[in-house]
Every structure is written in C-alpha cells, then in structure tokens.
Amino acid sequence: MTQTTHSSMQQTPDTARQADPFPVKGMDAVVFAVGNAKQAAHYYSTAFGMKLVAYSGPENGSRETASYVLTNGGARFVFTSVIKASTDWGHFLADHVAAHGDGVVDLAIEVPDARAAYAYAVEHGARGLVEPYETKDEHGTVVRAAIATYGKTRHTLVERTGYDGPYLPGFAAADPIVEPPAKRTFQAIDHCVGNVELGKMNEWVAFYNQVMGFTNMKEFVGDDIATEYSALMSKVVADGTLKVKFPINEPAIAKKKSQIDEYLEFYGGAGVQHIALATNDIVSSVRTMRAAGVQFLDTPDSYYDTLGEWAGETRVPVETLRELKILVDRDEDGYLLQIFTKPVQDKPTVFFEMIERHGSMGFGKGNFKALFEAIEREQEKRGNL
C-alpha cells in the first residue's frame, strides 16, 4: 500500500476548515431512489434500527414523489420513490430506478455557504446540475445547489444554518414506524464508496482534488487489494477535517470478474457501492441487526486462528469476533473492527459496512483478502465470478 498524507490532513480541524477553499460541515444525507419508499423505510427502521423523522408525499403537497427521512445519530438516509413523474426530477428518479434498481442518487454534503461552494466547484470544473436556490418554512431557510459526480450520482450542497425543521422545507415531522432499539446500531456515516469504470479512478480522484479541494488520504493497488481470481484498485479522498471521506474503486485486470465488474454490470454503470456506518459497539450492532434479519458476509474460522498474532489485543475477545464474523485491522495509529452486509436488494449492488474505530483511520487493508474471498464466494453462488 502507498499512503500519501498532505499537509492539510495534519492540521487541526478548525485550522483545516479555515484554510479549506471548499469547507464542509459533514455528510448531510444519503439519498436513495427506490421502487417503493414506504417499504424501504420499513426495512431500514426494523432491520437497521433507524428512526423515521420526516415525510413528504401527497398528503402534504408533494404530488410527484414520496420521501421518507430516517436518522440514527448523525446519519440521515432519505428514500424517495416516484408516484407520478411530471417534472425532470421525477422522470430522472423513475428512469434511475428502471436502469439501476434501488440505489444512491445523491451524496448530499452540508456546507456553511452553498452559494460559495457551488461557485467554487463550477469554476474548478464541476458540471452544475442545480444553481443555488432558497426554500423557506416556519423553521427557517435552507439554501441548496447540486453538482454532478460519477455515473448519475450527484452532490447536493446543503446550507441549513439556523434551520430547525425535521429535514427540509416541504417535509413534515413523522412518527417512527417502529420503536428504535434502546441502543443505537450506529452513530454516523463514516465513508461512502464509489465504483467507477476501468481507467476512471484517477479522473475522479482529480475531480475531488480540483473541484472540492479534497486531498488524497490513502491508496490501495496491486497485491494489497487482490486475490487469486480478482483485483481492484482504490484511492480515498477526504476533506481537510476528515468528516467526508470518499473511497473510489475501479476494477483491475484479473483471472475472473471482480466485485467491481459485477457491480458495474448489474448497476449499469458507475455508482455508490457501499456506505460505512460508524458504531461505538459493533458487537451490539451486529447482534441487533442479525436478529432483525440483516445478512452479513461470512468469514472462515481459519481467519481467527492466527488473528491475535498479528492484530494484537482488541476490546472484543477473539471468541466473540469469531462468533459474529467480525474482522480486525491494525495500523500505526490503532485498530478497527469491521463487518460487511450482503447486498440489501436483489441486485448485487449496494451494501453496508459497520465499522468501529480505535485510533485507526484506515479502511481495513489487512482484511482485503479475507473480505474479497468472502465476496467471491457470494459471486460464485450467483454465477457471476
């Protein structure tokens, strides 16, 4: 692995933000286009332990779409389906679901000044999709704009300073679908991973460098990220405060079809592959989510036979890690615990990662081989390896 650390990565968060030409406050929301938002909201409420907090639909003036907003700590998911397409946005969402299945259409980023962020991005090469505009209600004012990124994905730039509504103007507060678990299954979005076509990774890394002033955090190439059969390459870009982190993957030439190739084939192009969710108790999270029906990738027992020799001691005993199939990785800064779900829809596309960090700001380099072999076993079952 080659790791590049730029000076802005070493600054304190406040200093980094002041020096940042494209300051961000964090992830605002992950927005999904789905075939049935009501059912998706129920699934993520019951299986992921999220809480429905806001709704927009025909009952409160949205004649074209129905949207459900779910939260867990600082993480926010929005599920939108089309009732009757009558505008460009409605047709885009309907076409997106038809072409890609359920998937992420928007990685929305909260910024302190949406107008300035949009102007900077467009000036530095971004394709503008929606120019800055205001919406208001009794809770205050929100300013939004949108730029394009890989595939049909967009970044909505959201300025919500002083806004105290449940989500955005036009959304009404909603009661939970089910009572969330007593202990949160996760607290925040750790990172969002994009898959792009062969030869496009460096192009999109440069996009984030130039358009948003993001810096390169880590990169994984060659033997770091390959098995006997499949391979890929990955680079991670992040803002100066490390609150927004976007790994970008592309396939690499190998004997058989990689997980990235499979995704690109079934998704129909570039898009968001997985969302990593930060938890402070991965054991509790996995137990709760498994009991609710979430399926996680399996890891052979042999992985755990020598785990203590190279990963060292963690807060979770090896016996528990083995039982729950949780992976461990350690670097110079500490360690992390992680586990990955199987795809959460029929298409082998979007999945999730649960991650508990103890100092390490890595992405599980030591687990790549075990993880990819687990994914390959699932690919083989699907006949796609």
Image (cartoon, rainbow, N blue to C red):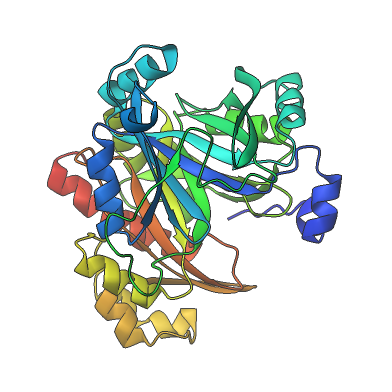
Residue closer to the observer: 256 or 218: 218
Q: Is residue 264 visible?
A: no
Question: Residue 132: image x %, image y %?
Answer: 67, 23
Residue closer to the observer: 271 or 226: 271
Question: Residue 376: image x %, image y %?
Answer: 25, 50
Quadrant location, the C terminus: top left
Residue positioned most to the front: 138
Number of numbered discs? 0
Relative horizontal placement of residue 27, taking residue 173 as reference (left or right): right
Instruction: Place residue 198 in its image quadrant.
Output: top left
The residue under the point 49% across, 62% down is 73
Relative horizontal placement of residue 119, taking residue 362 as reference (left or right): right
The residue under the point 47% across, 80% down is 310
The residue under the point 14% across, 40% down is 383
Q: Is residue 247 above or below residue 209?
A: below
Question: Residue 261: image x %, image y %?
Answer: 33, 34
The residue under the point 36% across, 77% down is 283
Quadrant location, the N terminus: bottom right
